[in-house]
Image (cartoon, rainbow, N blue to C red):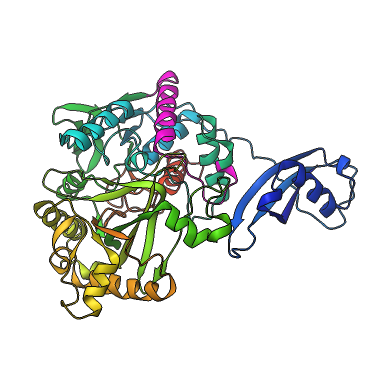
Amino acid sequence: MQLILHNIKISLEEDSFSAYKILAAKKLGMPETGVQEIRILKKSLDARDKRQFYYNLSLVATVSKRYKNKKNFPQLNEKPSKKEIINTLKERPVIVGFGPAGIFAALTFLEYGIKPIIFERGKKVEQRIKDIRDFENSKIFNPESNAQFGEGGAGTYSDGKLITRIKESGYVAKVLETFIRFGASEEIAYFNKPHLGTDQLCKIIKRIREFIVQSGGEIHFQAKVTNLIIENDSLKGVEVNGQQKCLSPTIVFAIGHSARDTLQMLSAKGVGLEAKPFALGVRIEHPAELINLMQYGEKYKDNQKIGPADYSLAHGGVFSFCMCPGGEIVNASSENGGLALNGMSNSQRNGQFSNSAIVAAVSVDDFGSSHPLAGIELQKEIEVKAYKNWSAPAQNLLDYLNAIQSQKIRPNSYKMGTVSTELNQLLPGFVTNKLIEAFKYWQQRLPMFVSDQAVLMAPETRTSSPVRILRSEKREAINLAGFYPVGEGAGYAGGITSSAVDAIKTVEAILGIL
């Protein structure tokens, strides 16, 4: 019998499997020898008291079937068996995009014996990384192979975060188990804030690609879908690279949040779109040791067991996003003539600096237009200004606030970040006003965060897609049968895990098993 034990608390110093077994036996009211096996279900660090850190655990304890469960500990449910289906698809399905949504759509089709055809505009991950390095070192930019486009999607060249707010635990577990199956650490299944890191994610994505191909799936790289083939208001297939045609009445569209040209094509074809809110702002960077001190205190700031500290901040519509402990800020541009920033870190998170986006929520009313692609135009306007005014020096946050508070300059008009221009000429006033108020608030409460060691860089524009492709309850585009938009680029997810879950559920809907 497998029983779930919640609210197990253990000090950081005592943390070990042998200690878990002792605590589990005590909670069950039996000798330690009665606990046959222990498995971690959930594990999170409680760092609220800087004098003593604890782990909070949920454990699965295997005990004899003769154990009298007088306290009614919940039993671990067995996994449901895979649903049997009859494949009613007349043609092999096409998947457009090979980021998290495209990858998990392909794996789900294969799970039911269906071999998809996949088109990815970028390159294989190992070639993609080379193009990114060439851009960083030699300023040779490839608009089809960069931090946004290529195998694995934007999340691969980020932090590989697997955090999600969605509550569908069965689907989330399936995503995590899949990553473990292809080489991720088993810890991601139970740690509170799981992540893979760019270095590990690249290896995992390659293994998944090889599995898909070995299982009969087709993956075509440097293959951008440039048109939809529609005849008599019916979807027939896609056009690739402006010439090749691939016919299929079932298209899973997993394009990612930066495929602006593809969204423009959809708009021209009359596919239903709507603008959606997103967020704009800056990147902030601190020495990792400073963030460790701020979050862990003097006692635990150098503790190697818990790794570099992260944080989550929010005030007045401004919030931290994509926090990268021990990481670096990277150029995440996807178009010539535009500058966009992002954060990334490797699996060890052992860099000297930590960074995060600090962004303000932007509503569709702020776009200045009712056009579905107005949010994209706002992003592009900011990125073009940033590119034209780019220069190497960055601005430390304390100098920025001191200049405002001493009234030496007008609010919203100080040079900030990697962009050598007045802030209000780069980011909209409704964004900078919120950022300033948030930084003033945090200056009083977190003086280490708002200090002369904090450096601001701008702009952070690609927090999520500012467009949603409208779909029905069956997950099909509202005005085009057989067209299934999924993931972050379609406006239905926010990150690797939620994109993967959205894709799994969409394939299940296509096959009639959702």
Residue 264 appears at what percent x and percent y?
Answer: 16, 48
To which quarter of the image does residue 350 belong? top left
Q: Can residue 419 be seen in this view?
A: yes
User: Is the stretch drawn in magenta largely helix, strand or loop?
Assistant: helix
Q: Can residue 489 be seen in this view?
A: no
Residue that lies at the very extreme toward the bottom in this rendered image: 407
Residue 276 appears at what percent x and percent y?
Answer: 28, 61
Q: Nearer the viewer, residue 252 or 295?
A: 295
Residue 124 appears at what percent x and percent y?
Answer: 30, 27
Asked if residue 215 is among those painted magenta in the image, a careful observer would answer yes
Write the residue at 33% across / 48% down.
343
Q: Which of 183 and 140 is in front in this view?
A: 140
Above/below status of 473 relative to 236: below
Write the residue at 43% across / 18% down.
214
Residue stretch rendered in magenta on the structure: 188-217
Write the residue at 25% across / 35% down.
132
Q: Which of 387 and 445 is in front in this view?
A: 445
Above/below status of 52 relative to 505: below
Asked if residue 514 is among those painted magenta in the image, a careful observer would answer no
Above/below status of 269 relative to 219: below
To which quarter of the image does residue 158 belong? top left
Q: Say left or right for 424 vs 293.
A: left
Above/below status of 56 relative to 429: above
Q: How many labels does the image show?
A: 0
Residue 402 appears at what percent x and percent y?
Answer: 26, 74
Q: Quadrant of the image for the N terminus?
A: top right
Q: Which of 490 and 3 is in front in this view?
A: 3
